[in-house]
Image (spheres, rainbow, N blue to C red):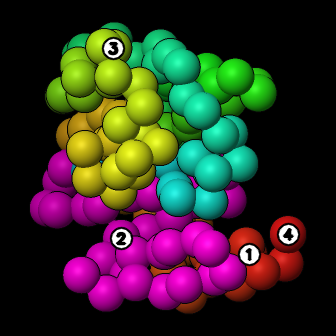
Amino acid sequence: MMSIKVGKYEILTDRYYTETDEWVKISGDEAIIGITDYAQKKLRDIVGVDLPELGKEVKLGDSVAVIESVKAAADIYAPLSGKIIEINEDLTEHPELINKDPYGKGWIFKLKITTDEGKEKLLTSEKYSEKIRGE
C-alpha cells in the first residue's frame, strides 16, 4: 500500500480525504469511512465511539458519529450522501483500534452511496498532505 509521509503522519494514496480529516475508500457504490492518522494523533487516546445507526440515511456534511478521547470529543461527518450499511461494532469494546490502525481495523462505518454529489469536494492524498503541511 502506497503512502505519503508528512512529518509523523501517514496518508494512504488509495483513498480520498475530507477537510474535516475523514478518509473515504470508494469501491463502486460503497464507501468505507474512518478518520485519518493525523486526526487520531491530534485526539490522542480514544476512549469511546458513538457509532451511527445502521440503515440511517445521511446527507453530505451530516454529523454521523462522535469519537471521544481523553482530550476532546470530535464529530465525524458524512463525506457523501447515502445509507449506513455497516458499522464497526468492534469499536464499542475497543475504541483504541482507531489509534492503533486508523486506516484498517479502526474504520468507523460503511455507506451505500446514493448520489455523486460531494465526490468532487473530496481531496486526493496529495491535496490532503498539502492541507496538513499548512496546519
Q: Which residue is mark 2?
A: 15
Q: Please state which of the two labelled residues, at mark 1 or mark 4, is closer to the viewer.
A: 4
Say whether residue 11 is magenta. Answer: yes
Residue range highlighted in magenta: 1-30
- Do tag 1 and tag 4 residues touch (Cβ < 8 Å)? yes
Q: Which residue is mark 1?
A: 131
Q: Which residue is mark 3?
A: 92
Q: Nearer the viewer, residue 87 or 4?
A: 4
Q: Quadrant of residue 25?
A: bottom left
At numbered mark 1, what does the secondary structure look like: helix, strand or loop? helix
Q: Earlier in the sequence, mark 3 or mark 4?
A: 3
- Please state which amino acid type lies under the numbered disc 2: Arg
Q: In the rendering, at what x and y percent does residue 82 appear?
A: 33, 36
Q: In the rendering, at what x and y percent does residue 128 appear?
A: 61, 75
At numbered mark 4, what does the secondary structure look like: helix, strand or loop? loop
What is the C-alpha distance between the residues marked 4 and 2? 21 Å
The residue drawn where x is 17% and y is 62% is 27
